[in-house]
């Protein structure tokens, strides 16, 4: 019993610690997916997008090195393990999440960071995001998701694939052995992203952004190691080897939509002994506290509320869309865009494409509407 | 159109405590003001872009924002578009910027 609770505690507190760093770094470097897209759409500035690409490159390299050396089995993650590629859920969920984050001034992780900075507006956004996400996991929206969206899928097993990993696809296409295909795919993708990110001299000389990208990518890798290796052990009660303290009951890394929902659930049903704090819940809390610590230390903490009726309306709508989209697409900007992509899951590529598409379209619309009004 | 800063200025507090480097900077003139208080990213930048597009070269736009991301955003916007960021400071808990149209 002590051993089981030890491992669960390690995973939980480890997740909290990683997230503390994430929150502080994200606040300091203004790490923001919606901001990165907005910078490109509104002023052709690729700085924050390069930070994102660098983070993905680092996560790709690190996660797949862990896989190569047998430390984790990424094929067990929620992103990879299903051979049923529910492409409609991934694309539509991603797109709705992208729309939502553009209306709500940032994605789930950005709102957690803002909450740490004193934004009560973000507290409201996160609460509605959590409720909407929970409704999509197990409630009214979930019924629609499960019966209409999820069944629209491609059976990858029929194509001879064991899971959703791009490495497997490359192996089949080229005849390379699995581990070589993995190295080639992950390596090429990381190299391409890293090269695009670092080729800009102005970005390279911005130490804060370069370090930010590297650290954030590294935190995703650390999450995999924590839940997939340190937190993988024998449950003394059942004698089964299990993954401890994760909501998905398998290895996880940073992701923020479902964890916000589970955090609300835990708070509301605290006396239900079957519920426990998990890696995800600890991570969501850690981002807020890490961001608050940085904000207070740097003198940037300030209370923030809603500006107007239209601000309230947009943020609420954005929150509900992010909750629904984030669960339907099995992840948010960090969940799919960083963590999912690091596993080379085909589904993660679709989800990220959806998120970017939805966000670009919404930002262009906002910009167009602004130039038209007077 | 000018805001009379003297109304809020307590003579006991040195000017630099209000975020201005010197008296000149505090009373720097501007041709147009955009109050983007309470608006979340990306609206402060979108509205700044629009406000600048209607101004002549050399004119100065004063922007007020409460979005903490706007400090970095304005710097990037100025770098990227060639408009000069003359001033980036805080005043009464809000972020205040002055941009000169290129």
Image: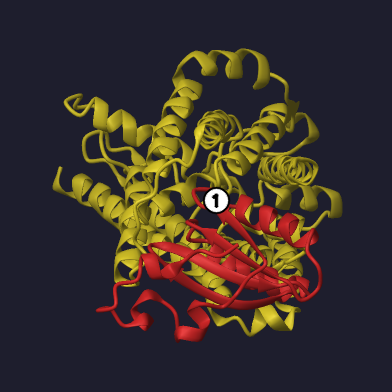
Chain colours: A yellow, B red
Q: Does residue A316 appear left or right of residue A346 in this picture?
A: left
Q: Quadrant of residue A322?
A: top right
Residue furthest out toward the left? A2
Residue at the spot 75% in from the left edge and 72% down from the top edge: B101
On screen, residue A94 above or below B99: above
Residue B7 image position (x, y, % from top left): 38, 65
Residue B45 image position (x, y, % from top left): 65, 58
Residue under numbered circle 1: A334
Q: Residues within 10 Å of mark 1 (few under 14, many from 20)?
A: many
Residue A91 image position (x, y, % from top left): 71, 34
Q: Does residue A246 appear left or right of residue B71 in this picture?
A: left
Q: Chain of mark 1?
A: A
Residue at the spot 72% in from the left edge and 49% down from the top edge: A166
On screen, residue A91 above or below A42: above
Residue at the spot 61% in from the left edge and 34% down from the top edge: A329
Specify whether residue A233 is in view: yes
Looking at the rendering, in which quadrant would you find the C terminus of chain A?
A: top right
Looking at the rendering, in which quadrant would you find the N terminus of chain A?
A: top left
Q: Does residue A99 appear left or right of residue A138 in this picture?
A: right
What is the secondary structure assignment of the residue under circle 1?
Answer: loop
- Picture mark count: 1
């Amino acid at each position: 019993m002590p051993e089981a609770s030890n491992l669960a505690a390690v995973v939980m507190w480890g997740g909290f610690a990683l997230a503390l760093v994430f929150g502080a770094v994200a606040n300091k470097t203004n790490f923001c997916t919606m901001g990165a897209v907005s910078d490109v759409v509104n002023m052709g500035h690729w700085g924050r997008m390069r930070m994102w690409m660098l983070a993905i490159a680092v996560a790709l390299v690190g996660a797949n090195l862990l896989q190569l050396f047998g430390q984790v089995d990424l094929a067990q993650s929620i992103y990879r393990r299903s051979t049923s590629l529910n492409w409609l859920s991934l694309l539509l969920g991603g797109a709705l999440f992208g729309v939502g984050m553009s209306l709500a001034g940032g994605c789930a992780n950005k709102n957690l960071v803002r909450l740490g900075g004193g934004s009560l507006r973000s507290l409201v956004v996160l609460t509605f995001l959590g409720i909407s996400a929970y409704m999509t996991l197990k409630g009214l929206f979930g019924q629609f998701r499960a019966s209409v969206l999820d069944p629209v899928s491609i059976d990858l097993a029929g194509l001879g694939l064991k899971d959703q990993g791009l490495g497997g696809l490359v192996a089949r296409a080229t005849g390379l052995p699995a581990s070589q295909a993995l190295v080639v795919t992950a390596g090429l993708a990381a190299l391409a992203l890293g090269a695009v990110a670092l080729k800009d001299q102005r970005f390279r000389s911005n130490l804060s952004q370069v370090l930010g990208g590297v650290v954030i990518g590294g935190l995703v890798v650390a999450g995999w190691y924590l839940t997939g290796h340190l937190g993988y052990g024998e449950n003394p009660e059942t004698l089964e080897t299990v993954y401890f303290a994760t909501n998905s009951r398998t290895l996880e890394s940073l992701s923020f939509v479902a964890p916000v929902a589970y955090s609300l659930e835990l708070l509301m049903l605290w006396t239900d002994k079957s519920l426990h704090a998990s890696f995800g819940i600890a991570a969501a809390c850690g981002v807020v506290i890490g961001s608050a610590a940085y904000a207070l230390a740097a003198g940037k903490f300030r209370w923030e509320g809603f500006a107007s009726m239209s601000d309230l309306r947009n943020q609420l709508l954005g929150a509900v869309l992010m909750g629904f989209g984030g669960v339907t697409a099995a992840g948010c900007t960090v969940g799919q865009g960083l963590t999912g992509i690091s596993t080379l899951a085909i589904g993660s590529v679709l989800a990220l494409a959806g998120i970017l598409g939805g966000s670009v379209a919404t930002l262009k619309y906002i910009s167009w509407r602004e130039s038209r009004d007077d | 159109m000018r805001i009379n800063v003297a109304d809020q200025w307590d003579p006991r507090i040195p000017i630099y405590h209000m975020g201005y480097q010197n008296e000149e900077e505090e009373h720097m003139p501007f041709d147009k003001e955009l109050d983007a208080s309470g608006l979340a990213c990306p609206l402060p930048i979108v509205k700044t872009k629009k406000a600048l597009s209607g101004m002549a070269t050399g004119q100065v736009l004063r922007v007020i924002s409460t979005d903490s991301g706007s400090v970095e955003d304005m710097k990037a916007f100025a770098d990227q578009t060639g408009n000069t960021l003359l001033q980036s400071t805080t005043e009464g808990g809000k972020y205040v910027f002055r941009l000169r149209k290129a």
